[in-house]
Image (cartoon, rainbow, N blue to C red):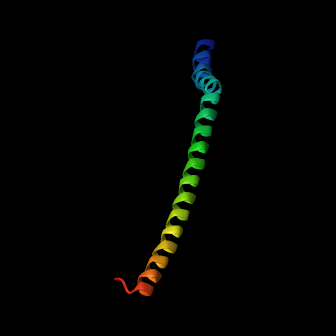
């Protein structure tokens, strides 16, 4: 293998690896955004569970009051 073909072959590997290393910070930034989104979705899911639990409790209480007052 002669020198020019060796340079071409090595540059085909070096350029993408260098680009990946330089953009690693961008990947870390994207990863942190996904982590933040996951955290927000967990909060929303917890809030929805609390909402539906409270709604079920209120429905039971309303049904009990309707039975007590004779309303339908």
What residue is at 45 percent from the left and 77 percent from the top? 62
Residue sticking out furthest to the top: 4
> Percent position (x, y) of residue 23?
61, 26
Residue closer to the observer: 3 or 46 = 46
Residue 9 vs residue 44, the one in the foreground:
44
Residue occupying the point 58% across, 35% down: 30
In this view, 1 is above or below 70: above
- Rendering quarter of residue 29: top right
Give the image quarter of residue 59.
bottom left
Residue at 62 percent of width and 38 percent of height:
32
In this figure, what is the number of numbered marks?
0
Furthest residue toward left: 72
**Dividing the image into 4 quarters, which one contains the N terminus?**
top right
Q: Position of residue 67 (x, y in %)?
A: 42, 86
Looking at this view, is 69 or 28 the one in front?
69
Seen in the image, is 8 located left or right of residue 69? right
Going by the picture, which residue comes out furthest to the front?
A: 69
Q: Is 21 placed left or right of 57 in the picture? A: right
Return the x and y of residue 72 as percentages of the image width and height. 34, 83
Q: In this picture, is 18 found above or below 62? A: above
Q: Residue at x 53, y 54 (%)?
A: 44
Relative to residue 41, is residue 9 depicted above or below? Answer: above
Q: Position of residue 13 (x, y in %)?
A: 60, 25
């Amino acid at each position: 293998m002669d020198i020019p073909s060796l340079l071409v072959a090595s540059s085909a590997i070096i350029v993408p690896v260098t680009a990946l290393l330089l953009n690693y910070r961008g990947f870390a930034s994207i990863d942190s955004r996904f982590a933040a989104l996951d955290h927000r979705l967990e909060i929303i899911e917890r809030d929805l569970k609390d909402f539906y639990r409270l709604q079920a409790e209120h429905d039971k209480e309303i049904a009990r009051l309707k039975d007590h007052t004779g309303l339908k």
